[in-house]
Image (tube, helix red, strand yellow):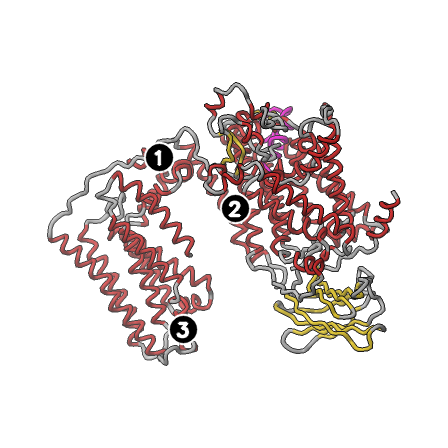
Amino acid sequence: MICLVALAAILYLRGWGLLHRQAPYRFTPERRAAYLAGLGVLWIALASPLDAFGNFLLEAHMVQHLLLILIAPPLILMGQPVLPILRGLPRVILKDGLGPFLRWRVLRRIGRLLTHPLASWSALTAAIVFWHVPRWFELALRSNTWHGVEHACFFYGAILFWWPVVQVWPSRPQWPGWMLIPYLVFADIVNTALSAWLVFSTHVVYQAYALAPRLGGVSALDDQSTAGAIMWVPGSFAYLIPALALAMQALNGPRIQPRLVRIEVAPRRDARRSWDLLRLPALGPILRHRSFRPLIQFILFALAMAVVIDGFFGPQIAPMNLAGVLPWTYWRGFAVIALLAGGNLFCMACPFMLPRNLGRRLLPARRRWPRMLRSKWLGVALLVTYFWVYEVFRLWSSPWWTAWIVVGYFVTAFVVDGWFRGASFCKYVCPIGQFHFLNSLVSPLQVKVRSEALCRSCHTHDCIRGNAAQRGCELHLFQPRKHGNFDCTFCLDCVHACPHDNVGILTNPPGSALFRNDGVDRHSSGIGKLSARPDAAALAWVLIFGALSNAAAMVDPVMQWMHSLQAVFGLRSMLPVTTVVLILGIVAVPLLLARICGAAAAWLGRVDDSSRRRLARSFAFALVPLGFSMWVAHFSFHLIAGWRSLAPVVDRILGRSAPLMIDVLPAWLPALQILLLDAGLVLSVYAAWRTAHRHVPEMSRALRLMTPWAILAMTLYAASVWVLFQPMQMRGMVM
Amino acid sequence: MRGVCLLLAASARLFADGGMIVLHQQAPPYVVTVFASPAPPRAGIVDLSVLLQKGETQEPVLDAEVQIEITRDANPIRVSATHELAQNKFLYAASLPLDEPGIWSYTVSLLSAASPKPIVVQGQIAVSGKTPKLVGYAGYLALPFVFLAVFALHQWLCNRHPLSLTAAARE
């Protein structure tokens, strides 16, 4: 509630500030004060202790309703809130989002119909009468949901009721002013009849109050009479005072019409406004400091060493071992949250940089990475292998194997970058890096140039070539032609190398790299067109379906099904079943679905049959937000549910024994997980729509082209929701 | 090479997954660790597993008698925890019908040859409600479809009326 009130206040104040400069006589400080007072009254009515008293005292409940009907709405409307709130919205939402609806004649007609005095009078009167019927009033007392509906009926009904009385600008009056006098008087008659019924009733009308504990020794009948009196006297004043003012206004002659004012929306800016993290007052200098990255890398390296040592020499029980807790509960959770909230921050803090640098010093590091391996195919194969190893060797429950995986990672990084030039390990080998490269396409931060014009005048290209003091981008990403986060490790080498200080960490709408400026069809430096790369599309398919498979493999029904398969085929080991199911889940099924959807889209969209593969590649990236949302929903579940996992491990290492305080799962966790999937689905369908529009400009064909992909996205969404609502096995953690 | 082989042999001594740890406590001469599964525990059948180790050597103790008593409000449930019920044979496990969500208090009693008197450790376990029903989240599930329907209408309107907002605002 407080968030909504705060948002309404912020939007209004932002818009009012802009409009006050253009039309100070219409958007006055008094109007601003009235609006804010109205919001304040609304907050008192709904979020103050008044609401709690309402369950015991009818008079408190009545005061709450009167505030919602007679005080808050007219005050809010007196602030003339329509234009200030619209102007307070970000320009892109106002023009591109709401614009078509504001121009829609049907919607304007509906608005005019609803604010017609006959409709608005009927709306509020019906709401008041309906909710005072004992059956419905008691339903609202019993159920929080229906109580909310009751309050919404009162508040929005009252907004409609007071609209013609206040005559909110720029709407036009539909009745002459004097007609509003009977409008208010008849409303008061209804109010009086209801109040009299409560005051003179000889029994308690609402049985819930007869049974409720009495506060302050007031009997239920006295409480009811007082409530009726409150409704009668202040309620009548609220109707009759405006009626009197209108009568005097009618007697004094017509109102002087205010001068018409033309409100202009600010012209479109050439460049979209972005926040630059490197220019933030406190954070910017820290991020830019040359020691910052080595410091966070060293911290992660130290943690990785602790995982290795405890994994080898500590107790081989995952919940008691750092190797069972740090990677599988904390690291995965924080990594995906960092991707969601920022960008590829794990690669920025990568602990494998130290062995990579050591390899470069001790080994020749002169060879070029083999041409045949310059793609993501090796990374995709390693990812599939990792998923297989994870399930078969139950990495989550084996500190020993986890430690070996980390050691293997260090050795590979040391050898690859000690033998080959550049960042071959990051770009072509590291499966964790591939996971981050792909999913950071959805992230809201991007390392990019601040001014493209400045880059056009630059001839040294230090950001990619480097200079005497700083190496350039090792992943061959030329900043002015870089699009999105794919292959970007957030190493900030380009930031330090640029002599014009023209590279920053800028904010972008999440997922915009997938659809804005030709999206994945745009040529990007060091990558080419993502939509033209089958290896990158394969990476996307594996990670999208990997998200679902990884979570599904730990829920009870799937585990039981796999065990039943083992029994049916008479197998002694789960290895063949796990292998086949995994290969089906992250390789065969995605491949099959990509072919089916590609063929169906080509047929429905009437596009060239030979472009089916191109469609499958393009639309694979549209599904990335959904896959990413599943990773976040899954890993954040482990992080939130197991956030105390570290405590017993630390206690063991320090030789302490302490009883653990344990919590139940937070009730909001399932809702948060669904909201994450919701956002993923919406962004995926939107990206699919924009992708379809790039292929065929006509709306109907684009709709047909995207239909198979939208169906696939919704199927994945349904499957993900189902998986999240199954009992999950928490793997190696403590609550 | 010999060192690596020794390392492999030493570190492969025990693999276990008894769920999540709910208690880790020194109870001389032993160290007692209690696990709960499923993790997090939800109302229904909950498995409690006990790992008993010698305090000095950390060796698992396999010949103890382990009793678990658990209660929420009244009517305590008493069961014996055994190796037979445990997936990992270093653990003593028991299945308990914890039908109500909330905080349950348990007592683990241990009897072994090394200690003449029974050793008792106590703790609490939080049991969440049963797996949430999808129906309760219908509003959240409908949200993306409402959003997509509004977006479809938006695109339809854009296709029909490519007007500027300034013109609409003037109107």
Closer to the camera in the image, A595 or A234 = A234
Residue drawn 23% across the image and 61% down it: A239
What residue is pinned by disc 2? B144
Location of the N terminus of chain A (image quadrant): bottom left
Q: Circle 2 sits in a helix, a strand or a loop, which is it?
A: helix
Q: Position of residue A521 (x, y in %)?
A: 57, 27
Q: Position of residue A585 (x, y in %)?
A: 71, 42
Side of B132 relative to A453 (left or right): right
Q: Earlier in the sequence, mark 1 or mark 2?
A: 2
Q: Is residue A672 visible?
A: yes
Compared with A666, A473 (above or below) is above
> What chain letter is assigned to the residue under label 1?
B
* Span highlighted in magenta in the image: A600-624
Residue drawn 74% across the image and 64% down it: B33
Which corner quadrant of the image does residue A257 belong to? top left
What residue is pinned by disc 1? B165
Q: Is residue A120 visible?
A: no
What residue is pinned by disc 3? A56
Label 2 environment density (alpha carbons within 10 Å; few <14, some 14–19, many ≥20): many
Tell me the CA gap for discs 1 and 3: 50 Å
Q: Position of residue A698 (x, y in %)?
A: 50, 28
> What chain letter is assigned to the residue under label 3?
A
Q: Main secondary structure of the magenta part?
A: helix
Q: Are marks 1 and 3 in contact (CB under 8 Å)?
A: no
Location of the C terminus of chain A (image quadrant): bottom right
- Residue type at numbered disc 2: Pro
